[in-house]
Amino acid sequence: MRFIISIIFLLFTNKLLASDCYYTLNGQIFNQYNTPLEFVEIKILENQTLIKSDEQGKFVIPNLCIQTYHFEFNHINCQTDTIIIHIKGDRKQTFYLEQLVYFLDEFTKTDAKLSDNLQMTNTINKFSMQQLSGKDLAQAIQAINGIRVIKSGSNINKPMFNGFYGDRITLVNNGVLFQSQDWGTDHAPEIAISNINKIEILNNSQTVEYSTQNIGATITIDNPLISYKDAIKFGLSYGLQSNGWQNSLATYFQKSFKKQYAFRIQTAFKKSADLHTPRYTLSNTAQQETSLSFQQKFNIKKSTIQTIYSLFSNENGILLAAHIGNIEDLKNAINSDTPIIIEPASYKIKNPKQFTQHHLLDIKLVQPLRKHHFIEYRTNFQNNRRQEYDIRRGNRSSTPALNMHLISYYGKLVNHSEKYLKTNWKWHQKSGLIYQYKNNTNDPNTGIIPIIPDYLQYNFAIFSIQEFFKNNISFDVGVRYENQQLNSYTFNKKELIIYKKNYNTYNFTANFSYLQKYFDYQTSISLSSKAPNISELFSNGLHHGTATIEYGNKMLKIENSYALSNAFNLKYRKYILLNIDYKLQYLKNFIYLQPNSDFLLTIKGAFPIFQYQSTNAFFNNIKIHTQINITDYFQFQFQSNLIRAKNLKTKDYIVNIPADQLKFGLKFYGDTKVLKNAYLQINGDYILKQKRTPKLIKDYKDVPNAYFLLNLQLGTSVGKANKIMLSFAAENILNKNYRDYLNRFRYFTDEIGFNFLFKINYFLNH
Amino acid sequence: MKYTTTQTLLLIFSSVILLQCTKQPLPINENELITRVQLTFTDTLGESSSFLYCINDGIFGNKKDTISLMKNKTYSLEISFYNVQSASVVDSINNEILEEAEEHQIFIQSITIDSFKYMDEDNNAYPIGLKTLIKTNNILSLEYFRIILIHQPNKKGLAVAQNQVKNAGGATDVDISFLIKLH
């Protein structure tokens, strides 16, 4: 290994000595109607330099080296596009960006938009997504500072932000508010990531468009938008992971016809066997995932219609060692150093297991009314099915123990407009009405009382976002009001009892940012509220894996969050970037699961009871991101995320808060004659021991110790026009034995050991 | 043009109100529960006595008998598990256990037991535990008599075939403790 690394270093250093960086790229940018685009931000991804186009859409980038560059074109009204250019000498080129929004070109907020550097720590771009092999959504977005993962075993992952997860995190999939059984800690989001253009945490008032409960974060996940620009686009990728011998395959195809019709079809498949820790196999952690989507776009006169259909289907084994019947079994399992039963690794998914399927159909209509003004109507239908199979007596194992079906319907009408105010401020507004319907049904043939009841939920919301820009200052305000009617159909023995609950929630967010040459600043306040969800109100049943009985609490009130955050950016040209993001958050009626002193006596033994309660809580979160570009080929990164959370009523800590995290990275990058856009990255992740755990809740097992993981990534493009992209990675190189506090199955097994990853991408008209 | 478009959109928007507004879910029949455990002790003369342990039983509700046996005596013990939802819905669980005999084992723990022997076996010649032979000792204080039914135990585990539950793994289906008094 050391030998290979030194060879790569040699390749880079040779290049360093030989490089001549005095070439210039002269470019001009147009939209699809051949109108020049001004204020397009061009970011060189290799060194994060920013350039802007002038009134004629022209720009000049001097001091380019002989190498391959990725230029990201950003324009407020356009689809973000990344273009790869191989610089061999001075170059002149015309670029086209597809304009999506019917505003005039002078209406851009780019010049006042918070600099990309401040945004950078909140986004993952297409380029990094393409390197990832076979990860799921939560694992992929971990790259964003502040995002952590709460796991059930090593194969079921759920994103967490500032210690919040589930319905306190709003997921927006291609502009569609994602609807699933998000209340369960072992319910991973059913979103495929095989073909993602950008993942971003929204940090301004745009969040009010999606929900009032932006208590954790609003995460937008966007596939590449289809454009009329290219005749044919095609991509094919294959990925391999040694831990679990996972194979993944993904492909997409896009075609457009004369600026009138375009479509994209994509599909992906992955399958993996049981994962393993350094010492043993994690029996029954195999999984399989299939996804498919079809997207199309066409114009009728001035209106644009876009439709998306997508299907996600997943089958996941549940760690066998976590299958226990009662608290005695739990104690036995905890006291056993290795799982009592270890089976040889296989691709077979046995009970207990989960099967999920998610269909989405979305239709969007954009109708320009006049200059600087258009309306958007969007409607979507989502169908989410979740089946959980258990090891059951008799011939019942083939009957799911839990079988839920969630149908949701969503309608949104939005009015957008932009204007120059007299004082030369630019004003952008977006207001809308939203209607939402959810219908959850449990299959009565399971033979087991379901953990949440059947319900019908109706939401009606109204929102407005106002944004103002001038020079290097921007200011935005968002408000949203939402009414929710929840009718739950519960049973007392065989008698049906209907509970009708009505909640009014609101969200107010204001945001101010100021940019300077060496210093950027952003401050925001956010007041948001969350109605108690179906599980917090009515859950009733056994929680597998922790052998606890969970009860809902019908008396819960609306949870209110009051947050203040400040972000600072210190920068010195392209060499140094220091980003500090600090958030203070007070929660009134914070809903959490509290152990009850009672036990429920059943024929299986006695079970501890947990019930949802509310308290007041205080959360503190600091994120630090430092990037030092030592040379044009060598970068040092440091990242840290610290969270403190207190239950103010019991004066105790809050459970399941991520431990302090420190990440270090060294990156070498550049081009050689054969390898374009090559990089080598060494990362160290240090997770401290979580010492701030609740004193009043007795844990079954001591909190895991601190651990340090060493990871390596290596990638390059080869061939003409960078049609082939290769990436290699090694995770947990030291094959460390460790457990993580945020893994719900940490009582039973270690985390996974060494993992080698490989991915190859082929692109046609990338 | 502008107003007609807006009106059309509003019409589409309002049409969604016509969705399902009520539900009529069916109650779930819990067919996998065990509500009653019955122990039948038969002495060498053929004299037998039965004791019940019920939780949410369709007939007895919650009921816990105290086992009463003679000291220093040998008994054959038969255990029966039932799901009793009502007087008319009585399911015997023993059939299910026998059908999947390889996946089940019963363990019995009490300090009043002097010697213990499994009297039945599955197709792989490992014990099941629905039938056992027990010899009581002479501890006369009120003690516990614990019955554990494990689903998918590791029957090959160390001393598992000798009634050692600790190494059995699996998932507990029944774990109850009768009171016992020897005379």
Image: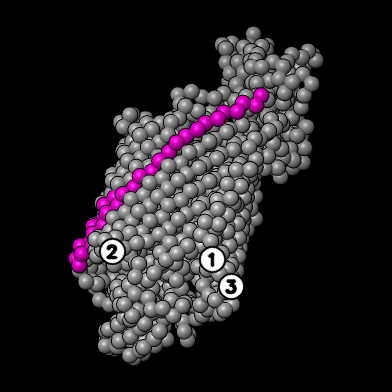
Q: Are marks 3 and 2 on the same chain?
A: yes
Chain ID, mark 2? A
Chain to which mark 1 belongs: A
Tell me the magenta residue range: A495-524
Q: Residues within 10 Å of mark 2 (few under 14, many from 20)?
A: some
Magenta stretch: dominant SS?
A: strand
Q: Which mark is residue A333?
A: none
Residue that badge 3 annotates:
A261
Residue sitting at x 54%, y 66% = A304
Q: Position of residue A195 (x, y in %)?
A: 52, 66
Please tell me which residue is depicted at 76% across the width and 27% down the height of the picture.
Answer: B92
Residue closest to the far top: B183
Q: Disc 1 on helix, strand or loop?
A: strand
Q: Is residue A179 left or right of residue A389?
A: left
Give the residue drawn at x 59%, y 77%.
Answer: A257
* SS under mark 3: strand
Pick the front one: B7 or A626: B7
